[in-house]
């Protein structure tokens, strides 16, 4: 155990970023929004960025690549395949990214229970993920979402991954129901807009809120809490073909591809698909 002086001199005091300005290494991240706001898709897009090294949302640089763990407590195996298959398995541009994502079989719930958590911990020790997504919070606990102690038991499990295994942990959560003031105006409590106990907003170092504008493809991503202070909100457009979000200003005409959006040059889609497939196959072998 080093003395404080030795500890301080051993490394930099600068933030070690997984994704520049957004996701710190070993960070605690909350993504939340109303039902139907496509929170899970955003979380998967975050994992895909870490696996491939491509900029998150086409603008935030990825500093470290590695495997991902996706603990899904809401969708059945068939629902995961039908709803997330394009992103996870057969992305039209990126090819097979699923080889870099560990997904336990079936629906995983109540990770606050010792036996279930032992399985998660064993998987983390084996595959050494750089990022882990738990979706959603309400399925991860066996107690009451409105009881702080019950929620804190889940958060303590996630902190174990962060501190003992160096895993950036992402928790997907739901927003509370809309509340109105005396004049009928919606009340915005900022990071405390989440459902249930408020401990998640206090635990998370980064809080991202995803707002869907009606039943359209338009969304707004709001950084409600980050280590860098205020980051501007991003207007997003949902692409239902490749099942991912793109910044509104980068949403080109229907003939454009994600290659143009990411400003990767005039490479043909087929060439990029093959190059990405080679990179992912190589990465998969390194992870085995």
Image (tube, rainbow, N blue to C red):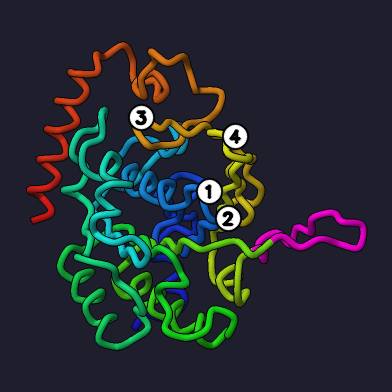
Q: Is residue 185 magenta?
A: yes
> Residue 181 vs residue 209: left or right?
right
Q: Nearer the viewer, residue 146 or 148?
A: 146
Asked if the residue at tag 1 contacts the one at tag 2, i.e. Cβ–Cβ closer than 8 Å, the answer is yes
Image coordinates of residue 156 in percent, x first then y, are 43, 80
CA gap between label 2 and label 1 equals: 6 Å
Quadrant that contains the C terminus: bottom left
Residue occupying image coordinates x 7% and y 48%: 285
Q: What residue did someone put label 3 on?
A: 241
CA gap between label 3 and label 2 equals: 23 Å
Whether 142 is drawn above or below 51: the answer is: below
CA gap between label 3 and label 1 equals: 17 Å
Q: What residue did someone put label 4 on?
A: 235
* Circle 1 residues within 10 Å: few <14, some 14–19, many ≥20: many
Residue occupying image coordinates x 25% and y 35%: 91
Give residue 202's quadrant in the image.
Answer: bottom right
Which callout, 4 or 3, points at the residue further toward the start of the chain? 4
Which callout, 3 or 1, points at the residue further toward the start of the chain? 1
- Label 3 element class: loop
- Label 1 element class: loop
Q: Nearer the viewer, mark 4 or mark 2?
A: 2
Q: What residue did someone put label 2 on?
A: 34
Q: Which residues are magenta?
A: 178-193
Residue occupying image coordinates x 54% and y 79%: 145
* Circle 2 residues within 10 Å: few <14, some 14–19, many ≥20: some
Which callout, 4 or 2, points at the residue further toward the start of the chain? 2
Farthest residue in the right direction? 183
Image coordinates of residue 134 in percent, x first then y, are 38, 65
């Amino acid at each position: 155990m080093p003395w404080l002086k030795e500890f301080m001199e051993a490394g930099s005091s600068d933030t070690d970023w997984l994704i520049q300005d957004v996701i710190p290494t070993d960070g605690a991240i909350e993504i939340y929004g109303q039902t139907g706001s496509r929170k899970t898709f955003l979380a998967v897009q975050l994992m895909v960025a870490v696996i491939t090294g491509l900029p998150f949302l086409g603008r935030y640089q990825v500093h470290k690549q590695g495997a991902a763990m996706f603990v899904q407590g809401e969708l059945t195996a068939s629902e995961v395949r039908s709803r997330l298959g394009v992103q996870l398995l057969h992305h039209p541009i990126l090819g097979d990214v699923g080889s870099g994502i560990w997904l336990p079989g079936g629906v995983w719930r109540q990770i606050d229970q010792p036996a279930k958590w032992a399985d998660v911990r064993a998987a983390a020790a084996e595959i050494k993920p750089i990022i882990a997504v738990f979706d959603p919070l309400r399925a991860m606990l066996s107690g009451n979402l409105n009881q702080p102690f019950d929620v804190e038991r889940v958060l303590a499990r996630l902190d174990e991954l962060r501190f003992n295994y160096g895993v950036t942990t992402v928790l997907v959560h739901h927003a509370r129901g809309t509340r109105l003031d005396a004049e009928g105006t919606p009340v915005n409590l900022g990071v405390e807009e989440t459902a249930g106990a408020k401990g998640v907003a206090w635990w998370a170092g980064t809080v991202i809120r995803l707002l869907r504008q009606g039943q359209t493809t338009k969304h707004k991503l709001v950084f409600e809490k980050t280590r860098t202070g205020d980051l501007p909100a991003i207007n997003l457009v949902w692409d239902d073909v490749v099942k991912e979000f793109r910044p509104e200003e980068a949403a080109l005409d229907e003939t454009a591809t994600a290659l143009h959006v990411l400003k990767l040059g005039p490479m043909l889609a087929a060439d990029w698909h093959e190059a990405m497939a080679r990179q992912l196959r190589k990465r998969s072998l390194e992870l085995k």
